[in-house]
Amino acid sequence: MNIAEHFPALVIVIPLLFALITWLAGLINRAFCWVIALTITFLCFLMSFSILNTVMHTGRISYHMGAWEPPWGIEYAIDYLNGFVLVVVSFIAFIVTLYSRKSVGLEIDEEKSPAFYSLYMLLFTGLMGMTITGDIFNLYVFIEITSLSGYALIAIGRRRNSLMASFNYLILGTIAATFILIGIGYLYMVTGSLNMADLREKLPPLYHSRVVLTAFGFFTVGLSLKLALFPLHIWLPNAYTYAPSVVSAIMAATSTKVGAYAMLRILFTVFKVEFDLNVVPVTKILLVLSCIAIIAGSILAISQTNIKRMLAYSSVGQIGYIVLGTTMANQTAMTGSIIHILNHALMKGTLFLVAGCVVYKTGIEDISGLKGMGQKMPFSMAAFTVGALSMVGVPLTVGFISKWYLATGALKAGMWFILPIILISSLLSAIYFWRIIEGIYFAPAVSSQHSEVSTYRSLDHHNPHPVSRSRDDAPPGMLIPTLILAGLCIFFGIAAYIPVSVAEKAANMLLGGT
Amino acid sequence: MVEIVHSAAPVCAIGVSLVAVILMLISKGYPNLREFWTIGASILKFSIVVSMLPTILDGKVIEYSLYSILPGLDIKFRVDPMGIFFALTASFLWIITSFYSIGYMRALKEHAQTRYFSFFAIALSATMGVAFSANLFTTFLFYELITLSTFPLVAHTETPEAIKSSRRYIAYLLGTSIAFQLSAIFLTYNATGTLEFSNHGILAGKAPDMLLIIIFILFMAGITKAAMMPFHSWLPAAMVAPTPVSALLHAVAVVKTGVFVLLKVILFVFGVDLLSKLGVGTALAYFASFTIIVASFIALRQDNLKLRLAYSTISQLSYVVLAVALLTPGGITASVMHIIIHAFGKITLFFAAGAIYVATRKTNISELNGIGKQMPLTMAAFTIGVLSMIGVPPAAGFISKWYMISGSIEARQIPFIIVIAASTILNACYFLPIVYTAYFKRHDNEIYNEEWRMLNKGYGMINLNSEVRIKEAPPLMVVSLILTAIGTLVLFFWPSLFLELARMVVGGVI
């Protein structure tokens, strides 16, 4: 028996199992937790990579859990799309874990760190599970695992604000999950099936049934909430701002992306393209919403003074991009959307990791705290600059690739009005990022007594260094993962054909091709 | 069909200064070694460009595909007569500017010199990239790189004023290029499926006229480096930069990149025939005329020498645009020739302005009384530059004016002859007073001596103080500006190489 055949099950089972083991090991020695998390995420990354590789060669993989045949048993179905997302999620999780050791040490109480890593593994399991499953009820289960561990992770930090942020997210997340569950129930009611591929075959005759339409409505709203599509984004800024840096990074880089993936699955796998275009004008509704999201997210980001909150609003805009590409139902734009799942994960991951580095070194989360950092933390700030230029969409960065596909796709679809929206949002992001870059390199450093915004200063054994111009960058353990992500922002901006070749196939498949 | 030679020479020409940047950063602590890399890179770059010249003069083009990011997004270089023309100008002047920069930066003991020289070198790499690019994507890529790499040079002094100006600089250049140029590129790609430059344009017959006109307007608005009104105000703002930056980048590399890209879009994306058919050439010519005249009037009112030069640049750049918009052989020749002719003239003027600043710390024209006696060499060079700007023989400016007028006659557009004549008068009005002030007004010291003598007449005291002594800037700077002034004269007497290249450009597109 070949072990590789069981990778689809193992990428879920192993982290799930180790979520518990991590916690137990933490009781013996807290240092074990990080080592275990790192090993497991890396292992999952390798397995995901191998799965994607198999998919690229042999096509769709179907794994039957416990050898129960679908549609009765749970099927894990991996095609180009979720193979791609699996690799993205597991890679980002690995990088963030690598980064987490020092950052967690600073931002989370010592005795909570085993719990942190345990929850972190659960979140990771949930995200991987949402991606890999081919069964809508199983999808719901993983959404709940993701959400519950997410609530706890946001609240695990030392700040009281994070409790409120977590609670808000809890309320809205529960509403979302309930909506999704209701949708699943309705579909099950009329078809008797929970398997995505099976539903795809069984649903077309029922497309005009009210039950199906209602189910579809519940799915759309529930998932929009999960992926924080404007105007259902209100939980996101607070959650990202007050969560520990590591949590902001992993959630910004992966969890909304997986939400977007789930939306794609429901829109284009469970239902067919014809349904989205002809029966319900859902693509039109999402098109308008995503355009508003893109512009509103960028405008809101401009007015922020807290760097994590600014990045969070920027995420709201970027999620708009991902949804936007899917709504045009054309191959180029869809490729843009899928590629943006990776690209945005890389860019936003980089930026959040840099924010974490700054917090680690200075305790400052305010944008003004970055002033004059170009000399003090040259490598972190170089990474920030790369991430920012990428967000603006400068050529040779991943941001440009996404915009190229989305813009040319929009023009191909004859939707010329998308073009100004994409470009205006690029301009807006140029404004909010340039303001910071200018401060980083051309403004004198703020002296430490000015930084009232310091959050961890008083709590911290780790005496923050007075802000000076002498070089004092983040420790290598944090710097290296940050630089890897920043490097990939450029690498995939140049070697764009690697992810694009997968994304193109995935887009083709979603739109009903082979 | 044009013969194509495949060679990596254009990539070397671009790469050499990027390699130099690494060496500069390594030799940060040793200023002499660091400056050696700048000089070495500039000479090597110029040599590589010159080495490509014979091939081009043979009527061949050099091509090199570096990398293809995605279908349609190729980084590809093609050296054609127009590209080598621009590259020769920029790389030659970089050598001179490097010497000048060293003199200037050391005389003023400027801070952050490594940053300064590094970004200068990157900006020059990017300029070569634009000169040699074979498609709109490569052009856009290097166009943006110029913007980003010159930002630290504009913000160099890091004073609040410099920060404010550099913010305007980046907002105009980056903003318009993303908003307009990039959308024009998207629309072009959507219409034609390619971004490759072609001698007769790529857009003909590919889209309805209305869309073509929109694309044209987007391009014109998006190539802000050409400083056409109303998107010109970044250029005066950029004058807060150290003078060598203003001299090479904001009189030659950056702004000429703007008009160069504009020429490329007009000639190689739209094509002469298509634009004549659409009739937008004349509209553009009127726009350029407006800029020429209005910028000249603004220049009249500037007392700050560098600002006056900047407005003069805005006006002179629009000459290039006006000339090409005529869409006639004479007009295209004039526009191509004016790229180099204005470069030599204006860089001389900026060098002189920098020399005056280093020697006397004076920046305003009203303070320059009698400076001709104090700095005879500098002001002699300045005068030659002024003659070239006005278009008086034996300075090279005459040549471009000559072709511009013949181009207007070919196009049967008499109004533009009037524009050229009027602007020549305006040029004289804002430049000659500077020369007059320098030579014929009495230096402050002279006035002081006079008064002293008057006061002490009856007392038989001899004058204690200061004759006007010759006090030039450091020799490196003076030599540089004399060289560029001589260049201006040489271009008048021996323009044949460049005229030949210009003729090849015209031969290709018409």
Image (cartoon, grey):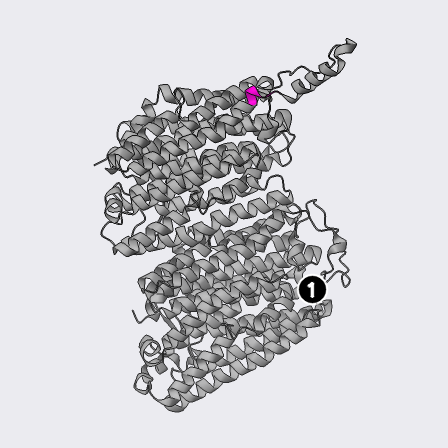
Chain of the residue on which disc 1 is drawn: A
What's under tag 1, amino acid-wise? Glu
- SS at mark 1? helix
Write the residue at 72% across / 14% down: B453
- Provide residue A126's location: percent of width, then percent of height: 53, 74
- Provide residue A513's location: percent of width, then percent of height: 29, 69
From the image, tell me which residue sits under label 1. Answer: A107
Q: Nearer the viewer, residue B458 or A200?
A: B458
Image position of A201 (left or right of A23): left
Write the residue at 67% across / 14% down: B467
Image position of A214 (left or right of A429): left
Q: Nearer the viewer, residue A256 or A391?
A: A391
- Provide residue A212's location: percent of width, then percent of height: 38, 86
Does the magenta run of residues contain B150?
no
Residue A466 appears anywhere in the view: yes
Image position of B242 (left or right of B89): right
Question: Residue B34, relative to residue A436: is it above or below?
Answer: above
Question: Residue A450, relative to residue B337: is it above or below?
Answer: below
Write the residue at 36% across / 33% down: B420
Image position of B347 (left or right of B498): right
Q: Nearer the viewer, residue A481 or B447?
A: B447
Which region shows up in magenta?
B438-442
Question: Residue A267, relative to residue B416: is it above or below?
Answer: below
From the image, give the main secondary structure of the stretch colored magenta.
Answer: helix
Query: Which of the image's four quarters has the N terminus of chain A?
Result: bottom left
Q: How many marks?
A: 1
- At label 1, counting other C-alpha atoms closer than 10 Å, the crowd grade (few under 14, some 14-19, many 20 or more) is many
Q: Nearer the viewer, residue A83 or A365?
A: A365
Residue A8 appears anywhere in the view: no
